[in-house]
Amino acid sequence: MTTTSTGTPARVVDFDDAVARFDPVMGLEVHVELSTATKMFCGCATTFGADPNTQVCPVCLGLPGALPVVNEGAVESAVRIGLALNCRIADWCRFARKNYFYPDMPKNFQTSQYDEPIAFDGYLDVEIPGAGDSGEPPEVFRVEIERAHMEEDTGKSTHVGTSGRIHGADYSLVDYNRAGIPLIEIVTKPITGAGERAPEVARAYVGALRDLLRALGVSDVRMEQGSLRCDANLSLRPRDDAAQQSVPFGTRTETKNVNSLRSVERAVRYEICRHAAVLDAGQAVVQETRHWHEDTGITTAGRPKSDADDYRYFPEPDLVPVSPSAEWVEGLRATLPEPPAQRRRRLQQDWGYSDLEMRDVVNAGAVEVIEDTVAAGATPAGARKWWTGELARRANAEGREVTDFGVTPAHVAELDGMVGEGRLNDSMARQVLEGVLAGEGTPTEVADARGLRMVRDDSALEEAVDAAIAASPDVADKVRGGKVQAAGALIGQVMKQMKGQADAARARELILERLSPPE
Amino acid sequence: MSAITRDDVAHVAMLARISLSEDELDRLAGQLDQIVDWVGQVNQVAAADVPPMSHPLPLTNVTRPDEVRPALTAEQALAGAPEAEQQRFAVPRILDED
């Protein structure tokens, strides 16, 4: 079997060409870290960013004799996630040991679930933009869920270079604060039939899952902090439009480290192009993990599947089975939030947004934050304008979230209020937002510190208007003669004189009053 | 009936990172085979309607509330580590990073 080489950029074929001849099949595995206060099997805290090895105990360090006990909050979250994904909930299931040797897992096994997941056989309907360039309603694509099971996260290792102390060799440093944090792994069934829209479906699925988990309140779902992680499996099979269902799946690769919605789409797209090139060359796709590189937009070969991938799963003898009662499950079903798609339609109506405006809001991941901003007193139009403007541009450019820049719903509501009251004009409000982004304080503090305030006192404005007219008699004559658009030059002078701190609309009114032809 | 072959032992030893000599492989294959046979005797008394069990206790749903309990200090956690640096466990080089 021929293998593709590691390191050198792989050959790829054009995407349109690839999907014209091959049918992509995807399988998405999403790991979500639960936002429980404690770990899955011990009472250690789960705070992100704590000092290394300060949230550890004999259980999560795998010390001899330590016994795990299941976190009831984590089981509750797992059941609620399963229900929200339209899954069946197991009436009895066990944990299993997944045995492997790796320093990030000090017990030498991960406590997971194997053939008895707590939730299985569900689906999630996701929306992708209409096929045309504009106007078409979104298409709904159903992604079938194979299972959602409970497990635990691993520790975090940091590599140290060749100058290390351990006999001059390279070594790694491990922090076990993350080891044992509850994870839910959500696995789709093979996603077929998406064709050339497969990359968009992958992105929409992870996005819809993120919205759903956020609405459930079970996780921070911050992809950049790793509390939501996606592995994308992909294979291609030749297109046979007459009998596609009976064409067997090709060999798959599993791309790891795909940690933003945009990357999910790009990584799937890249692997489609790469697989097509391998198959075109008459070679076999190697079953292996691939690493996604955000900066270059390519994947490189990771570990091939080997004999060592034999995890010898067996039921965890230190834990007793989990058996959720039907009454408890039905009680939890009653706590499920409104499904995100339905909620978006309701909010769009409440806020009076057009389809296009709502699409921008959804793409910016700003639905929740706008809801909070409106609740804090902003107008829906103002909330949308600020969150989908500069903040969304910046978030998109940096692969981050609009809420990552220190600007809060309360800030935006305050800013919107200052514009509404006429204290700030639009350009001042932008400067205030810049100040808030730079960490200079709340909008009011920034406006005060920078001396930004529209002059409401007409006498100062009138003086400036008179000065501008006196300084440009020829322009004034044009306006008098009926060329109203010439007033723009005068407004510019007035705003300059007022150092931008005036209401341009009021200045225009005053200029036109002064220069109106005699009755 | 021989269930455990010499190759099985070599494979499991590789997975468990245990180095075994040729003699040990031969000896362990025989011994493990015998153990499997003994345990297999359970099958003679357990009828098809007796499900496999992983646990002798008739318990389910043993859980604890989601409440933080005191952790070890980093000093205590690292006390048994052969090597530590920057308040972290130092381990031989590993391939993947995350």
Image (cartoon, grey):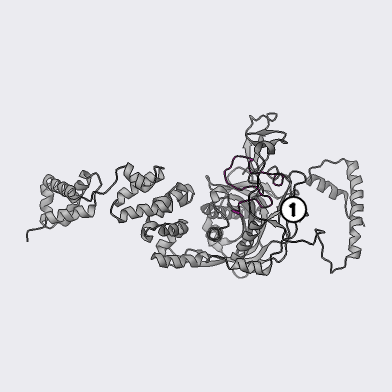
Quadrant placement of the C terminus of chain A: bottom left
- Tell me which amino acid carries mark 1: Arg
Q: Which residue is more in the foreground, A244 or B93?
A: B93
Magenta-drawn stretch, dominant element (helix, strand or loop): loop
Classed neighbour count for the residue bearing mark 1: other residues with Cα under 10 Å, few (<14), some (14–19), many (≥20): many
Q: Is residue A313 left or right of residue A271?
A: right
Residue occupying the point 35% across, 52% down: A415
Q: Give the residue pinned by disc 1.
A: A97
Residue occupying the point 49% across, 49% down: A399
Q: Which residue is more in the foreground, A119 or A27?
A: A119
Find the magenta span and give its range: A32-61
**What percent of the width, then of the height, locates residue A3?**
67, 48
Residue A205 visible in image: no
**What percent of the width, then of the height, locates residue A141?**
54, 66
Q: Which residue is more in the foreground, A291 or A34?
A: A34
Quadrant in which residue A380 is drawn: bottom left
